[in-house]
């Protein structure tokens, strides 16, 4: 477990990770075919934006967050490293009882009402290429497959609950008070999962031969996480090695930063600390731009984003600086679980298994039957082999017709998520059904019902008829629904699953925008008029994930894919 620290520092690596000698894990990666003129021009334009100082990249102390936060807010939290509530004082959706416990387990079980009942026997490839196998678990034509995993990457950047207990089914269960629970991530999109606590203190994350750069691993066909002798990723948050796709995103952020260092040095920035700070700011601010202009509008709709930006937040109004509310962490933002496909095409030409030499690598997102394999056939992380890399044309639209879609946001969860490998559960305990864990978490935090939040927010709640599948449990869950389930059903009923509905969407939009506005090192707070300094390679006029991956050197055409 990593130790939590204050807003001006980053989470440290676990003490058990050993120091490493310089090896092929610390190679200096080239820009991967990125135009040097474009890279240098962008880096030079961005180089002057950083005001270095003893208090951080922007020279502003973290205490400024508390001093400048909106006064008289509605939210509660004991501190930025603790969880809190957006809506304090509201009752839980239900009282703990053995009957409630049984109902929540039944709702979230394999074969239950949340299970999409995917035909896993058809194999991972057929579940992608045969639309007839996905009539219930429908595609979302507005979201490419990578949106799901970018949402996961963002979540890992701002929230990590490693201490609260899941509801155990006892009427005497003592719910966790959010204000007393530690968030093991800083509530800011500051990429501390990538940077740790900086190249001075977090030495294992950085290239010993070039301290302004992050370490990148090798040994497979392309880059990998830097790993120790046991194959454990040497990164700021082990969850970013949970699956191949989020691992690939983490590696892309490493390479983007390293290429930014190269560009800055060629533009005349030679001092190591300054090169690191400016490269980090460029990486982070381009990340913030994508969150605000690409991903958040996909999650909640552009109209909701515009309203929060223009009118300000109505409900996420911290009294003393940014914190992570459990309505977001435990419920609304977990909408991404319904977007996960049962299987993915990881790449187009990486599978060297017998009979498929050089062909596409298809795999279930998780397959428990692969436990113990040195090169699993599913897409779990933690392993290195030539086929275990991401071909990004599957996950984002490079204009070649190869991009696949996410699933819609609804009450149908892909069947592989009904039985997770213990290795991807932070607490390494049961139950292993992700929907069951999400539902029990509503009791852990004493979260209010979706209907009660709709009323508090001045919105029309869903009707009991919209939630009729819950009536049979005899607990009134169709009238007082767990917030996570309500958010999925709200998206399904009001938005046809294309984006979040009004209650969950407002929570997600206000928290994400709020975290950016309250962070003194975000562009939205420090320099709101800033725009990306690196050009859009497709000429679309707005920097997006395709541009980011291209500048990281991992685009398909840069790899001959």
Image (cartoon, grey):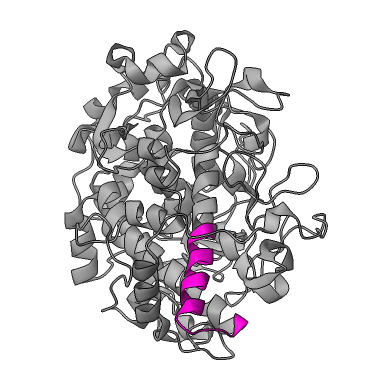
Q: Position of residue 199 (x, y in %)?
A: 66, 72
Q: Please determine whether, in this image, residue 79 is positioned above or below residue 152.
A: below
Q: Which residue is more in the foreground, 528 or 259?
A: 259
Residue 279 magenta-drawn?
no
Quadrant of the drawing holding the N terminus: bottom right
Residue in the image at 48% along x and 77% along y: 266
Q: Is residue 207 visible?
A: yes
Number of numbered callouts drawn: 0
Q: Which residue is more in the foreground, 561 or 290?
A: 561
Magenta residues (range)? 255-272
Task: Give the residue at the far top of this rendering.
Answer: 121
Q: Is residue 454 visible?
A: no
Q: Position of residue 98 (x, y in %)?
A: 58, 27
Quadrant of the drawing holding the C terminus: top left
Q: Please determine whether, in this image, residue 311 is positioned above or below residue 169.
A: below
Q: Which residue is more in the foreground, 79 or 41?
A: 41
Q: Position of residue 194 (x, y in %)?
A: 57, 60
Q: Position of residue 345 (x, y in %)?
A: 43, 28
Q: Please determine whether, in this image, residue 360 is positioned above or below residue 191.
A: above
Magenta span: chief secondary structure:
helix
User: In the image, 352: left or right of 287?
Assistant: right
Q: Quadrant of residue 213?
A: bottom right
Residue in the image at 40% along x and 62% along y: 287
Residue 261 magenta-drawn?
yes
Q: Quadrant of residue 379?
A: top right
Residue in the image at 59% along x and 14% along y: 354
User: In the image, 498: left or right of 324?
Assistant: left
User: In the image, 541: left or right of 330?
Assistant: left
Residue in the image at 57% along x and 88% along y: 55
Q: Please determine whether, in this image, residue 410 is positioned above or below residue 10.
A: above
């Amino acid at each position: 477990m990593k130790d939590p620290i204050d807003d001006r520092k980053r989470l440290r690596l676990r003490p058990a990770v050993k120091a490493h000698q310089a090896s092929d894990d610390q190679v200096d990666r080239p820009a991967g075919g990125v135009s040097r003129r474009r890279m240098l021009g962008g880096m030079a334009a961005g180089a002057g934006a950083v005001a270095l100082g003893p208090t951080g990249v922007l020279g502003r102390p973290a205490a400024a967050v508390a001093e400048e936060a909106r006064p008289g807010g509605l939210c509660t939290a004991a501190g930025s490293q603790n969880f809190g509530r957006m809506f304090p004082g509201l009752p839980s959706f239900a009282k703990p009882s053995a009957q409630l416990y049984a109902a929540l387990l039944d709702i979230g079980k394999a074969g239950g009402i949340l299970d999409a009942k995917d035909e896993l026997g058809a194999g991972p490839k057929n579940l992608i290429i045969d639309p007839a196998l996905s009539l219930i678990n429908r595609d979302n034509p507005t979201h490419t497959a990578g949106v799901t995993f970018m949402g996961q990457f963002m979540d890992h950047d701002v929230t990590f609950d490693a201490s609260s207990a899941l509801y155990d089914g006892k009427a005497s269960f003592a719910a966790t008070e959010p204000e007393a629970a530690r968030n093991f991530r800083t509530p800011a999109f500051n990429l501390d999962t990538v940077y740790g606590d900086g190249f001075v203190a977090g030495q294992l994350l950085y290239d010993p031969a070039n301290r302004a750069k992050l370490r990148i691993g090798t040994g497979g066909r392309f880059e990998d996480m830097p790993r120790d002798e046991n194959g454990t990723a040497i990164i700021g948050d082990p969850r970013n090695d949970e699956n191949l796709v989020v691992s690939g995103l983490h590696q892309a952020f490493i390479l983007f930063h390293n290429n930014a260092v190269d560009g800055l040095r060629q533009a005349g920035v030679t001092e190591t600390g300054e090169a690191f700070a400016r490269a980090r700011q460029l990486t982070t601010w381009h990340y913030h731009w994508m969150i605000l202009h690409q991903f958040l509008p996909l999650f909640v709709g552009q109209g909701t984003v515009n309203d929060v930006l223009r009118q300000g937040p109505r409900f996420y109004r911290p009294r003393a600086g940014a914190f992570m509310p459990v309505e977001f962490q435990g419920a609304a933002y977990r909408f991404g679980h319904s977007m996960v496909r049962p299987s993915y095409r990881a790449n187009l030409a990486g599978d060297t298994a017998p009979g498929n030499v050089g062909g596409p690598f298809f795999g279930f997102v998780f397959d428990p039957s692969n436990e113990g394999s040195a090169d699993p056939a599913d897409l779990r992380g933690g392993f290195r082999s030539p086929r275990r890399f991401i071909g990004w044309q599957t996950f984002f639209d490079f204009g070649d017709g190869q991009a696949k879609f996410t699933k819609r946001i609804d009450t149908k969860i892909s069947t592989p998520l009904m039985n997770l490998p213990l290795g991807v559960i932070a607490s390494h305990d049961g139950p292993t059904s992700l929907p069951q864990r999400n539902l029990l978490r509503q009791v852990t935090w004493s979260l209010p019902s979706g209907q009660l939040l709709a009323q508090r927010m001045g919105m029309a709640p869903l009707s009991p008829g919209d939630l009729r599948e819950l009536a049979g449990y005899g607990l009134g869950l169709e009238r007082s629904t767990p917030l996570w389930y309500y958010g999925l059903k709200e998206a399904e009923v009001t938005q046809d699953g294309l984006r979040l509905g009004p209650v969950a969407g407002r929570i997600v939009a206000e928290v994400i925008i709020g975290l950016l506005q309250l962070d003194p090192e975000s562009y939205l707070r420090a320099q709101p008029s800033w725009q990306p300094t690196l050009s859009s390679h497709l000429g679309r006029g707005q920097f997006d994930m395709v541009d980011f991956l291209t500048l990281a050197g991992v685009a398909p055409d840069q790899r001959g894919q």
